[in-house]
Image (cartoon, rainbow, N blue to C red):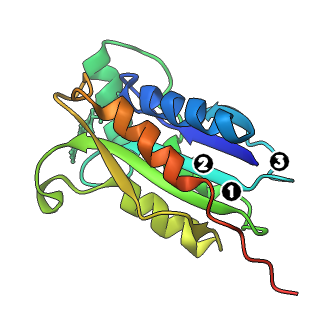
Amino acid sequence: MKSIVVYESWFANTRDVAEAVADELLEHGEVQLLSVDDPLQSLDGVDLLVVGAPTHAHGLSSSMTRKSALQQRGSDAEAGTGVRGWLDRLPPADGQRAAAFDTRFRKSIFLTGSAARGIAKRLERRGYELAAPPVSFFVLDTAGPLEDGEIESAREWAKRLVGIPILTLV
Ligand SMILES: Cc1cc2nc3c(=O)[nH]c(=O)nc-3n(C[C@H](O)[C@H](O)[C@H](O)COP(=O)(O)O)c2cc1C
């Protein structure tokens, strides 16, 4: 099985989750771990695409929230296009399955919003079949850290993404 794990991350929490997911998927085949700032790779031969991002202002980051994250980090780096821009450039699915995750605060989703939901919606619009419902992993504060046990939860989630047979109609 060939997988790509793509992440946006400003304080390394979503990156840490993405790394744990990629590491688990490595048990089941080839994995490429990419940031949304890396050039978009070919999806030829890819079976599973996993996309993760931090929840910003109830959903996907915008140029304003990315600048705010950089400011909070005390960095003058480029704000980039985030996962939103990456998904805009994503080619339509050609049989690949996909999954979405985010990081956010552990409060009611009605209060926090969820980037994963927005990512999943966009993936489905592009024809990607979801291997699992969108999922959230929780941070204690804006800059992290992740709550205890979230890396293990991410590994468990990744295990559930594999082993589901891809049905091919003949
Ligand atoms: C500008 C900004 C807006 C945010 N808005 C939300 C929000 O609406 N809901 C939420 O749960 N967390 C929000 N957060 C917290 C982020 O989800 C948290 O910073 C993120 O999970 C950390 O992941 P990262 O280290 O990968 O950037 C916000 C953070 C920033 C910087």
- In the image, taking residue 20 as reference, residue 146 lies left or right, namely left
- Residue 122 is situated, as x and y percent measured from the top left of the image, at 52, 66
The dot on residue 103 is: none
Task: Please state which of the two labelled residues, at mark 3 or mark 2, is closer to the viewer.
Answer: 3
Quarter of the figure with residue 147: top left
Asked whether 153 or 80 is in front, the reply is: 153
Q: Residue furthest bottom?
A: 170
For disc 3, the marked residue is: 42
Amino acid type, residue under disc 2 in the picture: Trp
Quadrant of the rendered image holding ligand 1 = top left
The dot on residue 86 is: 2
For disc 1, the marked residue is: 90
Asked whether 128 or 158 is in front, the reply is: 158
Q: Are marks 2 and 1 in contact (CB under 8 Å)?
A: yes
**Residue occupying the point 16% across, 29% down:** 140
> Secondary structure beneath disc 1?
loop
Q: Is mark 1 within 8 Å of ligand 1?
A: no
Neighbourhood count class around disc 3 (C-alpha, 10 Å): few under 14, some 14–19, many 20 upward: few
In the image, residue 79 above or below residue 132: above
- Residue 114 is situated, as x and y percent measured from the top left of the image, at 30, 55
Amino acid type, residue under disc 3 in the picture: Ser
Q: Earlier in the sequence, mark 1 or mark 3?
A: 3
- Residue 48 is situated, as x and y percent measured from the top left of the image, at 67, 54
Asked whether 158 or 4 is in front, the reply is: 158
